Amino acid sequence: MRKEWSILSVMLAFLLLLAACNRTDKEQANEPEGSNDKPAQTEDNKIDTSLLPTEVINEGEAIQGGTLHVGLVSDSPFKGIFLAELSADATDSSITGYASNGLFEVDGDFLITDEGIAKLEVDTDNKKATITIQSDVKWSDGTPLTAEDLIYPYEIIGHPDYEGVRYDDNFKNIVGAEEYHDGKATTISGIKKIDDKTIEISLKKVSPAIYSGGDGLWGYAAPKHQLKSIAIKDLISSDAVRKNPITLGPFKFEQIVNGESVQFVANEHYFKGKPKIEKLIVQVVSTSTVGEALKAGRFDIASVPATQYDTIKNLSNISILGRPELSYSYLGFKLGKYDQEKGENIYDENAKMNDIQLRQAIAYAMDIETVTDRFYQGLRVRANSLIPPAFKTYYDGALEGYHYDTEKAKELLDAAGYKDIDGDGIREDKEGNKFTIRLAAMSGSDTDEAIVEYYRQNWKEVGLDVQLTTGRLIEFNNFYDKVQADDPEIDMYMAAWSTGTNPSPAGLYSKGAAFNFSRYVSDDLTKLLNDIDSEEALDATYRAKAFRSWQEYMSDKAMIIPMYFRTSTIAINKRIKSYNIDRETGTEIQDLELIADAPIK
């Protein structure tokens, strides 16, 4: 019944770090590798993920205090934007998680409970939400948390000078948000301070999404006393965001080495009590060296990519915990542009990749099953949907998705008019011109290049010439800069999302979602998304049917092809007394204890 919640934040990242932080951020995608030879499919490499425990207990007397060392597995430096309203990167978000400003907690069904800093009450008849601070909570500098701090994030996100990604269709559900954003009002009329600990939000509609943090609800507070003197346009570069954030979580920032590491100290003002460990250091470590770093006792905790599982599975100084992730990897197609001024996606019917049969053929040509077995040891499986199976009520297990079928791919390409006219084995476009597809994919672990090359070979086998944007894999931060900016050199791209605890897809695929990277928009899609988060969907059966209809539509249109569902593998050094990553009963970071002064080698 614990678990900190952060709204469907759609942050891009490489991994989820600690179960205790329980970030609900958007993840980065692929970890490919390989050669042009088809990898051998072998059961010997596969892991029975059901055998990975969710808890470890080590014998020994707990020491007083101590320093916890956390490995942040990434092949790129972190950006260092430590304010939820501005961050668009889950690497930053996973760091901020130790000092999170999250207001709510969720239960095992991902519904908001009354166990967090604030409680939520919803008046469906009058379309109002009331948020109340439940006790005398203080910021890390000792300043009391007030209703003003609950309101200020909405004023940041809705401000005319705000250039972040949180102002979207969900946010516009708040009464007065659009008028405030357009400069027609100086406040958001639908947000009212009731008293020093309570605010009331008037909404245009109320749906079941609100109980998971949707419908425009924002799950964080912001320290107004620190931020109010800083212009909204200057916040992202300010010391208050980059160097000395004031926070609500179990730890507070002490020292930041840009892009490399962050040192935290225990927050004596934390509402659940001061943590038992005194310090916590988060340090970036590359995917290729994390195994050796764990072996050498550099880290107590690290979430290890599936491609690196073999490097840690036999280490005697760690235990490996596992659980399904709330995420999926996918292949996306560029079908339009994002209009920053209008704040909406513009679908281009004449886009190069706007042919359903072409997109479906690309999907059928991918030998995902072999890649999951050979390179991911069963820690990833072929995804059939854009809803992770953890959302049992909404996931459509009957959906077939796109399995490997080269003959089907060739039939679709022939039917669509993509044919090999000159006999060189590569298909021309419908007009008989040379046809090359440009793929953007991220660099990362040692296996990335090989897996991407294997997929390129898959596509070549059905007659498609796929070349890498920039001629090589792209560094994580640059990759998302290019994808978000709709770089004209990108026709399709490999990425991933972590859905967070709110399964609603509106924040990723609606007309006003900046994270709708494919830029696909249609009246039918809008209706399906609205149905999921409609007042009628307060009926559980209605909403489940709406989710299924949306999944079927997305599969049919194939603007986004699900590739993998994932299993997290988290390495825990044996000097940690106990650790549990169960989403409902897992260890909270303030309760973690150590049984030795340094990580065990």
Image: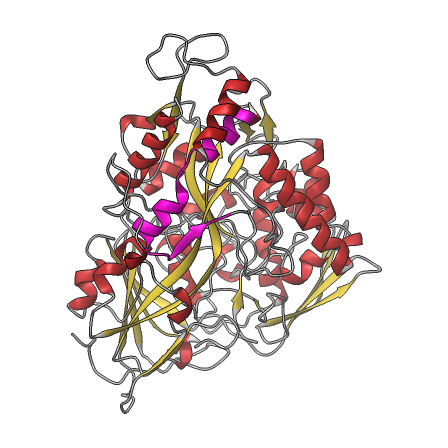
In the drawing, does residue 124 fall left or right of residue 390? right
In the drawing, does residue 160 fall left or right of residue 19? right
Q: Position of residue 378 (x, y in %)?
A: 37, 56
Residue 375 belongs to magenta span? yes
Q: What is the quadrant of the C terminus in the image?
A: bottom left
**Quadrant of res 591:** bottom left
Q: Position of residue 226 (x, y in %)?
A: 47, 59
The scheme the figure's colours follow is secondary structure
Q: Is residue 158 above or below residue 105?
A: above
Q: Position of residue 287 (x, y in %)?
A: 25, 53
Tell me how many marks there are.
0
In the drawing, does residue 78 fall left or right of residue 413? left
Q: What is the quadrant of the N terminus in the image?
A: bottom right
Using the rendered image of the protein, determine whether residue 97 is visible from the camera's viewpoint.
yes
Q: Is residue 401 above or below residue 427?
A: below
Using the rendered image of the protein, determine whether residue 188 is visible from the camera's viewpoint.
no
Q: Position of residue 202 (x, y in %)?
A: 75, 55
Q: Nearer the viewer, residue 160 or 407?
A: 407
Residue depicted at 51% across the width and 61% down the height: 223
Residue depicted at 51% across the width and 49% down the height: 10
Q: Nearer the viewer, residue 304 or 361?
A: 361
Q: Main secondary structure of the magenta part?
A: helix
Residue 523 belongs to magenta span? no
Q: Looking at this view, name the residue that lies furthest to the right.
A: 125
Over which residues does the magenta segment extend?
357-383
